[in-house]
Amino acid sequence: MATTYHNTGSNISQLVGNGLTYSASVDFLTAGSGETLILKNCQITNTTPPSGSTWYDINVCAYLQDNSAATTHSLAYFMVIPKYSSLDILSDNLVLEENDKLVIDITGSAEATTTYKVSAVGSYMKIT
């Protein structure tokens, strides 16, 4: 049994016009065949640029999709991340077994024509 340490990151973005709905998603981390992953942290940062001189908050949802139980569990549900801010969605380690994954969504109503976006980074241990 081998154990190795890794980092992972994703950028999620959606260009949208004023008054429209934005929605984008990414599979942040997926355990492959024969793998067990232990996610140590998952830091999500609001990187939405200003529109003119106005900055915007962003809504984030994060889900664990448990393949063996065929269920989905919320880790963060419509958490608002203000401008210049970030959020670590884990209070402790999260175990991902074979084909489990962590999905991150951004969603909401646009207050201006801009690109709503977040960056997510995390560190994990892989056991094979």
Image (cartoon, rainbow, N blue to C red):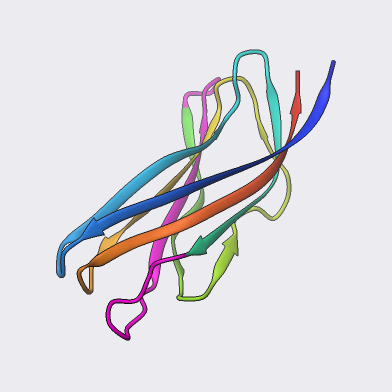
Above or below: residue 65 compared with residue 111? above
- Give the residue at the far bottom of this rendering: 53
Residue 2 position by quadrant: top right
Taking the image as shown, residue 71 lies to the left or right of residue 111, namely right
As rendered, which of 98 and 69 lies closer to the eye?
98
Above or below: residue 74 compared with residue 110? above
As rendered, which of 60 and 3 lies closer to the eye?
3
Q: Image point 29% across, 54% down: which residue?
A: 14
Residue 23 location (% of width, % of height): 28, 51
Residue 24 location (% of width, % of height): 32, 48
Q: Image point 69% across, 30% down: which residue?
A: 37
Above or below: residue 54 compared with residue 14? below
Q: Image point 45% across, 76% down: which residue?
A: 83
Residue 5 location (% of width, % of height): 78, 35
- Placement of the C terminus among the 4 image quadrants: top right
Above or below: residue 117 compared with residue 34? below
- Placement of the N terminus among the 4 image quadrants: top right
Q: Main secondary structure of the magenta part?
A: loop
Residue 92 location (% of width, % of height): 73, 50
Look at the image and say whether residue 48 sits in the magenta stretch: yes
Look at the image and say whether residue 52 sits in the magenta stretch: yes
Total label count?
0
Write down the region rendered in magenta. 47-70
Q: Image point 52% across, 63% down: which residue?
A: 45
